[in-house]
Amino acid sequence: MSDIEPKLPLRLTQVLGFCGRLLLRLMRRRGFWIAAGILFVVWVLPASCTTYVPPEMAAVKQSYYGSGAGIKRDVYGPGLHFVTSGVERLHLFPRNLQVVNFSDSTSEVSSKSRTAPSIKIQTNDGYNVQLDVTVLYRLEEPYLVFVEAGPGTAYEDRLIIPRVDRILRKTLGELNSEEFYQGPKRIEKSRNAHEQLATELKVYGVKVDAVLVRRYVYDERYQQLIEGRKIKDQTVYLRQAEAKEAIEQRKRDTATAEGAAAQQVELSRGRAEVEKLRAQADLYKRKRASEGTLLVDLAEAKGTELANQALQGAGSENLVGLKMADTLRGVKVLIVPSDGKDGVNPLDLPAMLRKFEVR
């Protein structure tokens, strides 16, 4: 061990001496300084003399020393900007839509928007109302915002939140509880509050896009009063609806009865028309039948008259004979003698029966 320990410091000295001699040789060369300058520009200078402005952000430059010390009016957009380290600084401000929620609900807390306590309003008749409100705005002039409120998000506490609270309490506090509850005047006052807030903040470079009254809660006294009043109102509306329903029911019953009566009248009229048509048809039928019977009777009478005339005229004997022959057609005729041995007396019926063996 004693032989090795003296050799270590000697080797370290040799290495350091070699590195020193190499560095001196490099410093005598021009390329060494060029490479060192490039490394300084690429690595050291950006880290100490530039500031990056992200998208949807804007920056305002502030100088701390020299004759130009103060806040510059120039606004720097997204990108990389050179600043003098220790002497200048860029303060960032958002350019996109900003949100402030005024609410006491834990569900309203968000990392993407500012949350403030709900706004407490007293109506002109002494009732308290708690409002949940959302305000939408943009920072159009970062320089004016920075001059008035300072860096960071100080504009929320110094410009936005106090004015929203004051203007809404003043504007909506001009309403009484009934007007506040009914809606139209509350909406009108909310619109007036938006206009007043936009006018006040415009001079500080802030544009107010909307003031939204999302929810309101009355104190317990007025809540009970409203509930009682609404129950009475609903009872009145119910009675009115029932009366109107009864009137409409009577109208409907009257219309139904009138319709039924009209239906019966029309049915009776229809039946009368049917009976009338049937009577007309029957009369027409009988008339035609009578006319036909009359024609047949006249024809038969005419035929009888003609037959009589024929029987009375020349050749009537022959005609009568023909009629008698036609009548006796198919009748068997027996000719028996009336005198002599086998003569038959037609008036002697027993003899005729014996003659023909009739038992």
Image (tube, rainbow, N blue to C red):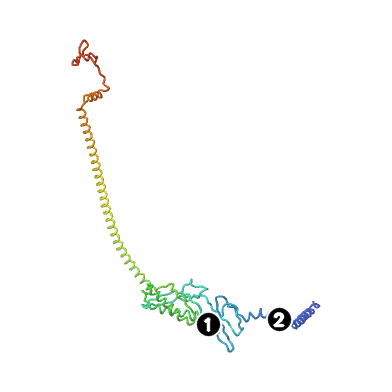
Instruction: Tell which circle, 1 or 2, labels the residue nearer the N-terminal end.
Output: 2
Q: In terms of depth relative to the viewer, which is nearer, 120 or 317?
A: 317
In this view, 358 is above or below 171: above
Q: Which residue is mark 1?
A: 143
Label 1's element?
helix
Residue type marked 1: Tyr
Extreme residue toward the right, this view: 3
In this view, 293 is above or below 219: above
User: Residue 197, image x and y in percent?
Assistant: 45, 79
Task: Identify the residue shown where x is 65% and y is 81%.
Answer: 45
Task: Say whether marks 1 and 2 touch (CB < 8 Å).
Answer: no
User: Residue 228, image x and y in percent?
Assistant: 35, 70
- Residue 34 is marked as 2
User: Residue 251, image x and y in percent?
Assistant: 28, 60
- Residue 306 is marked as none
Q: In terms of depth relative to the viewer, which is nearer, 187 or 354?
A: 354
Q: Tell me which corner region of the image, top left, top right, bottom left or bottom right, holds residue 21.
A: bottom right
Label 2's element?
helix
Residue 134 appears left or right of 266 = right
Q: In terms of depth relative to the viewer, which is nearer, 75 or 63?
A: 75
Extreme residue toward the front, this view: 314
In this view, 56 is above or below 282: below
Answer yes or no: is residue 339 visible: yes
Residue type marked 2: Ile
Answer yes or no: is residue 359 visible: no
Q: Label 1 vs label 2: CA separation?
A: 41 Å
Extreme residue toward the top, this view: 341
Give the mark count. 2
Task: Identify the residue shown where x is 48% and y is 72%.
Answer: 108
